[in-house]
Image (tube, rainbow, N blue to C red):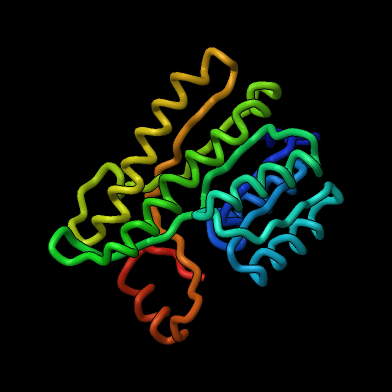
Amino acid sequence: MEETSLAGKIALITGAGCGIGKATALLFAKLGARLVLVDLREEDLNATTNECNGISETPVLPIVADIADDHMVQVIHQKTLDHFGGLDILVNNAGIFAEDTAENFDPQMFDRCIKVNLRAPIMLTQAFIAALVKSKGAVVNVSSMASLRVDTAVMSYGVSKAGQDMFTKCAALQLAPKGVRVNSIHCRTFIFVRHALPAPVCLLWGSHCSWALF
């Protein structure tokens, strides 16, 4: 099957330092897109940026930012427009995971889940609406099966992703007449970065589930 070309398109990807975000960035680089890559971890972001530069000569703008901070959302918006002049594709991928229940949850972690998984995608989409309308662009929200299937052990995460799904539906209906597509992707497989987990623990965990660990 012939791959779609993204030559000349400007794509912004949050959570681009690892996992789904990194894989998306590498694919988009291969397809010729100009990239704005956002991540909280500078080391991971630089690694993805370097790999993208090795794939394509198209420009890459890395931005280290915590998207839970409304001010940083505006910084991302301004830097993107200053550097590229517009936006064609917004991939709201960055997210955090929490294991908790209705009886036992940390309010601070709940707030963090809502800010990163729900509020930030809404704020970023709102910030770029004018640019996306101009380019007849697209928004892709990376959701989760946890938004559709009840898991009492991940309440905060599930609530935040379910809210993201409703936002996707609302934005899709509102922006479709203006030529902007808004869709969600519900991943069936969890993809985590190992981070601080010791390698033996990661391998043991991976042997008992279908999750991808790297």
Asked whether 108 or 44 is in front, the reply is: 108
Look at 79% across and 55% down and name the residue there: 55
Residue farthest along the top direction in this orientation: 177
Asked whether 133 or 148 is in front, the reply is: 133
Residue farthest along the front direction in this orientation: 71
Look at 44% across and 45% down and name the residue there: 119
| Res. 89 image quadrant | top right
Residue 8 percent across, percent down from the top left: 80, 34
| Res. 113 image quadrant | bottom left
Answer above or below: position of 199 versus 72: below
Residue farthest along the right direction in this orientation: 57
Look at 59% across and 51% down and name the residue there: 71
Residue 93 percent across, percent down from the top left: 52, 49
Residue 98 percent across, percent down from the top left: 33, 63
Look at 51% across and 40% down and name the residue there: 123
Answer above or below: position of 118 versus 138: below
Asked whether 49 or 101 is in front, the reply is: 101
**Total marks in image:** 0
Left or right, 211 with reference to 208: right
Left or right, 98 with reference to 68: left
Residue 58 percent across, percent down from the top left: 83, 47
| Res. 41 image quadrant | bottom right
Which image quadrant: the N terminus? top right
